Amino acid sequence: MSLAERLLIARLKERDGRAFDEIVGLYGDKVFSLVYRMLGNRHEAEDVAQEVFITVFKTVDGFRGEAKFSTWLLRIAANQSKNRIKYLSRRPTDGGEIDDALEARAAAGTAGSVSRAQIDGPDLLFEAAETEAIMQRAIAALPEDHRLLVILRDVEEMSYQEIGEITGLPEGTIKSRLHRARMSIKEELDRHTK
Amino acid sequence: MDHAQAQSTFSDFVEGSLPERERLEVEQHLAACIQCRTELQSFRRTVGSLGKLKRTAPPSFLPDIKQQIYRRSHGRFFAPRWKLFGRIPFEWISLATIIAMLVYYLAMLHGTPSGVHPAP
């Protein structure tokens, strides 16, 4: 952990409001993105991602710096996402996933990922949004531990070491589960494109 | 090497973490197998597309969190400040008050007292 990060955490432990702003500024997008892809629903993702930072604010005194702060934070995000998935699975569905597929199409114009499509025209824009919706459904169909691995590695582009620290899994297990998850998403994508 | 064996190495192959000998075996298989080449192409496209799924938090994210903490802590943290004093540091207000009092004192010291006449 860098000196700057240690100082920032020390300020956060003193409940410095500006330190909290910096923490949310630094990690807000990463946490939101992880939670959003885990849950596949924007409304739920906003709620859980907010809860993650509230938990950080409440429990930062318990952070002893043994792991990187980002690792500790993303572990909280992963656990809270899993808890919400369990909670939602016990409730009857309200069509949130359908809303999100539509939202993915609508959001395609604002997502950085489709800038090429924006240049090339509405057809590619629509295609990129369709692909995103298919991928989100394929991710949602994975078991939650496979889902977490594919998000951490392929969406958030984290190293195997960081993923191991967050999930507590050995590298070999991460790699084999990740490969199965990727193949499963590939098959789903192939099924829709053929 | 058969199709299943080749495809089970795709992750390591794409990430470049396959041992040299195995990598050569996969490459040999790919050179001769159009089915696995097509599968690999699709696999690469999938992994590449996953990298484009990042999302950013909404603009109201930070204010919403602070509001929640304010509410749950019963106003102990992130209380909304009164606008004027939220922007002007208290040190400046103190300094301005001291200067104003000093000016008033000096004015009183050197000014001509009015309505006071010396005793006859």
Image (cartoon, helix red, strand yellow):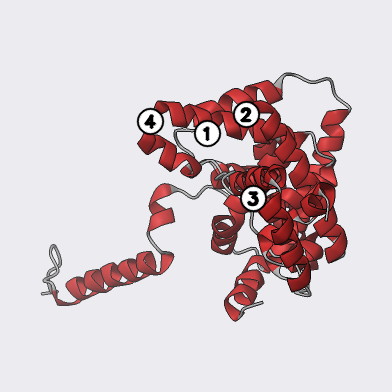
Q: Going by the picture, which residue comes out furthest to the bottom? A: A3
Quadrant of the rendering where the N terminus of chain A is positioned: bottom right
In this view, A47 is above or below A55: above
What residue did someone put label 4 on?
A121
The answer to whether the residue labelled 3 contacts the one labelled 2, judged by CB atoms less than 8 Å apart, is no
- Kind of element beneath mark 4: loop
Can you identify the residue that label 3 sits on? Answer: A155
Locate residue A23 relative to residue A123 in the image: left or right: right
Quadrant in the rendering for residue A99: top right
Instruction: Tell me which chain the residue with mark 1 is part of.
Output: A
Q: Which residue occupies 78% across, 53% down? A: B6
Q: Is residue A141 left or right of residue A36?
A: right
Is any part of residue A176 visible from this angle? yes
Of marks 1 and 3, the one in the foreground: 1
Closer to the eye: label 1 or 2: 2
Task: Report the mark closest to the observer, 4 or 2.
Answer: 2
Q: First in sequence, mark 1 or 3: give its number.
A: 1
Q: Give percent across and percent down for residue A41.
A: 68, 32
Q: Upstream in the sequence, badge 4 or badge 1?
A: 4
Q: Which residue is mark 2?
A: A193
Q: Earlier in the sequence, mark 1 or mark 2?
A: 1
Pointer 1 residue: A128
Which callout, 3 or 2, points to the residue nearer the camera?
A: 2
> Do the residues bearing badges 4 and 2 touch, measured as CB atoms within 8 Å?
no
At label 1, the amino acid type is: Ala
The picture places residue B15, in percent across and down from the top left corner, at 67, 62
* Mark toward the start of the polypeptide (4 vs 2): 4
Query: What chain does badge 3 belong to?
Result: A
Using the numbered discs, state the Cα–Cα distance from disc 1 to disc 3 in whole angstroms. 16 Å
Tell me the chain of label 4: A
Mark 3 or mark 2, which has the lower sequence index? 3
For label 3, count other residues whose C-alpha is less than 10 Å away and answer few (under 14), some (14-19) or many (20+): many
